[in-house]
Every structure is written in structure tokens, then in C-alpha cells.
Image: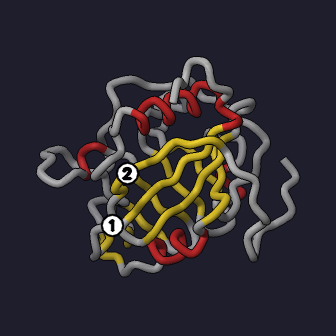
Amino acid sequence: MDLESTDHATIEAALVTDKGTMVVTFFSEQAPQHVASFLKLAQDGFYNGISFHRIVRNFMIQTGCPNSKEGATGQPGTGGPGYNLPAEFSDIHHERGILSMARSQDPNSAGSQFFVVHGEAAFLDRSYTVFGKIEAGLDVLDAIASIECDFGPGGEKSSPQERVEIRSIELRPRQERAPQEGDAADDN
């Protein structure tokens, strides 16, 4: 797929994980640089083999760190693509199924790491860049979020006992589909 000439709003991504597939569409108008970066990294295979290294049930599941690949030597949660993106905050609400960029204290420090919101997370609104939404596969989100976790390096019970990877991300033309059960009305 030629990402340069394709309207990113017409693209969807199938995130194939060990627990099933989540289909994502993008908010290219609200977060054009983040969407473009994610699509390029996905097309280049950057995310293949990366695990969900941080899981907090009823909050979010986080992935996108190259240090979480098998054989990587860095601390999971500290890696990135080698560049940072400027914040693109919007009024899109952090609710179940939303994809948002992880970052450090610096609002302009997002790179490749992202999280999928599992529960209500209004406290993140207008402070983190929302760039996509799960259109199909909320059951996969639930399956990953239900993995038992141990306490991690920061004292948070978020270090998964079971490894779940993104096997691949397939970019394809966006398909129309019926709303998922449990979806809130789309007001974006």
C-alpha cells in the first residue's frame, strides 16, 4: 500500500496477536503525524514480535516497545523508533477500544509505544494523543487485559505472567462494519 498517496482515513489495520485480531481505524484528521508514523512503522514490520509489556485490567494494555521483542536487551517500556512526535491532543474521549500514544512526562515524547484503553480513562483526555479506535476485536482486548500480572519495576501490578505478541499488522482498505456489541454511539 502506498502510504504517501492513500488517504489515511481510508485505511484500517488488522493487529494480529497471539489472542486474536483487533481491527483498528484511524483519526487521521485529529492526529495526522501519529497516524502516519504508526502506519509507516506497521508497514515496515517494526511491531512484528513486540509484546504487550504492560497490562492494567480495566485501564489499558500497552505495547510498541522494541525492547519487548524476544532477545532484546533493553528494559521493556523504554524503547522507541529513534524519534519523537509532537503532541496532537484532541477532544476524543479515552474510552474502551481507543488507541492512544504512550509518552514520558514530556508531552512531545511519543514514538512507537501505544496503549489500548480497556476501561474508562477520562483523566487522560487532552493529555495523550488519541490516534485510533478498535472497530472489531474488543473480545481480543478483553482477553489480553484479563492476563494475570505481577508487580513490575515501578511497583505497579502490570507485568504480564503470559507473553502476548503482535504477530503482524496488515494494512488494508477500510471496510464498513456494524457497531460492536457494547459500543457507545460514535460521536467523533
Residue assigned mark 2: 168
Locate residue 116, reporting x and y percent.
55, 57
Residue 164 tag number: 1
Amino acid type at circle 2 is: Ser
Identify the image's colour scheme: rainbow, by chain, secondary structure or one colour: secondary structure
| Neighbourhood count class around disc 2 (C-alpha, 10 Å): few under 14, some 14–19, many 20 upward | many
Residue 174, quarter of picture? top right
Question: In the image, what residue occupies the spot 60% across and 29% down?
Answer: 87
Q: Is residue 69 left or right of residue 99?
A: left
Name the one closer to the observer, 114 or 16.
16
| Residue 66 image point, x, y percent | 28, 43
Q: Which mark is residue 125?
A: none
Q: Please identify the quarter of the rendering in which residue 54 is found.
A: bottom left
> Can you tell which quarter of the image residue 118 is in?
bottom right
Instruction: Give the residue at x 32% y 48%.
Output: 48
Point 34% across, 31% down: residue: 81
- Disc 1 secondary structure class: loop
Q: CA distance from mark 2 to mark 1?
A: 12 Å
Q: Residue at 75% across / 76% down in the picture?
A: 181
Q: Position of residue 75 (x, y in %)?
A: 22, 48
